[in-house]
Image: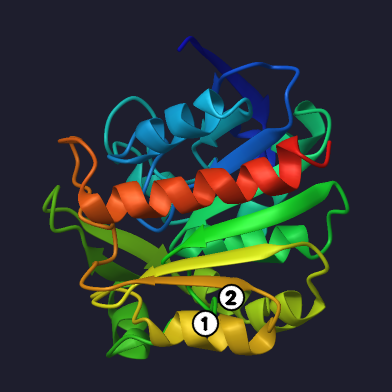
């Protein structure tokens, strides 16, 4: 299926680079990557193709300050400046460019971004999350000591062997955004997909989100981890990812295709 690259001006005028799959006149699903993620990572192109094959438009994109310019995390100076507020600004810029009703699909931190955005954007008709976080407040050991000594907190990237810097203002900005309040106030359908053995965002986050939004659809995939078995470079869908993809596609077909 053909794909088209485009970009819009996001937070601080930085480009939000995107790839559109499927019919550009169809209702669109915006696919938000997570922490240490990017639009071309592993499962995202595959998910976009699955959504497009269902008669929708899928748009996968890089947040403007995700640290990827030409290759994996070649701009850690931008990653240092990333915040939840920037993500909301990027989503707003992208939504302004994409007409019609919207669906959102977010993985990990991108799931939290999607819920936050949907709570204030009436064009969003439905939200699906994969391994979503339940809070933007990050609790890791020795935050203050690292911030004082280095000026940032270093998060290791197991795949690239880089230390990914997160500045103090990113931790402080997280306090400004409540996923709980957004979930409680959500008026559109919500699907929460999570692996029972998620090593990065424990399945308790799914339980919290479902508690805040009792009407949410919940799919817990037994034995699945944070990326549902997907790796980068992509080696094809696992059984767990296939199950999640089928449920996500049906969810968007129900709430975007059948109601548009």
Tell whether 21 sits left or right of 121. left
Mark 1 → mark 2, Cα distance in angstroms: 5 Å
The kind of secondary structure element at disc 2 is helix
Circle nearer the N terminus (1, 2): 1
For the rendered model, the colour scheme is rainbow
> Which of these two is toward me, 147 or 32?
32
Where is residue 34, by image quadrant?
bottom left
Where is residue 25, by image quadrant?
top right
> Which residue appears at 72% of the width and 58% of the height?
117
Evaluate whether residue 205 shows in this view: yes
The kind of secondary structure element at disc 1 is loop
Residue identifier under label 1: 137
Residue sitting at the far top: 2
> Which of these two is toward me, 217 or 19?
217
Vertical comparison of 27 with 138: above or below: above
Vertical comparison of 12 with 108: above or below: above
Q: Mark 1 near mark 2, Cβ–Cβ under 8 Å? A: yes
Q: Which mark is residue 228?
A: none
> Which of these two is toward me, 54 or 169?
54
Vertical comparison of 256 with 200: above or below: above
Evaluate whether residue 84 shows in this view: no
């Amino acid at each position: 299926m053909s794909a088209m690259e485009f970009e819009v001006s996001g937070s601080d005028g930085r480009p939000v680079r995107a790839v559109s799959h499927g019919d550009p006149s169809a209702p669109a699903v915006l696919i938000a990557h997570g922490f240490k993620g990017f639009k071309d990572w592993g499962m995202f192109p595959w998910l976009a193709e699955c959504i497009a094959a269902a008669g929708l438009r899928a748009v996968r994109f890089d947040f403007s300050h995700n640290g990827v310019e030409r290759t994996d995390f070649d701009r850690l100076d931008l990653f240092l400046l990333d915040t939840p507020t920037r993500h909301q600004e990027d989503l707003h810029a992208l939504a302004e460019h994409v007409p019609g009703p919207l669906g959102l699909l977010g993985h990990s931190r991108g799931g939290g971004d999607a819920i936050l955005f949907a709570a204030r954007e009436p064009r969003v008709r439905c939200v699906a999350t994969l391994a979503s976080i339940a809070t933007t407040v990050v609790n890791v050991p020795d935050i203050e000591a690292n911030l004082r000594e280095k000026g940032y907190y270093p998060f290791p990237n197991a795949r690239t062997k880089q230390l990914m810097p997160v500045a103090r203002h990113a931790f402080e900005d997280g306090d400004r955004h409540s996923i709980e309040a957004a979930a409680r106030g959500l008026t559109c359908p919500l699907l929460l997909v999570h692996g029972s053995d998620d090593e990065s965002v424990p399945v308790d986050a799914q339980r919290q989100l479902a508690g805040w939004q009792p009407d949410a659809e919940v799919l817990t995939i037994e034995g699945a981890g944070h990326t549902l078995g997907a790796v980068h470079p992509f080696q094809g869908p696992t059984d767990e990812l296939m199950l999640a993809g089928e449920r996500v596609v049906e969810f968007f077909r129900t709430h975007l295709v059948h109601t548009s």
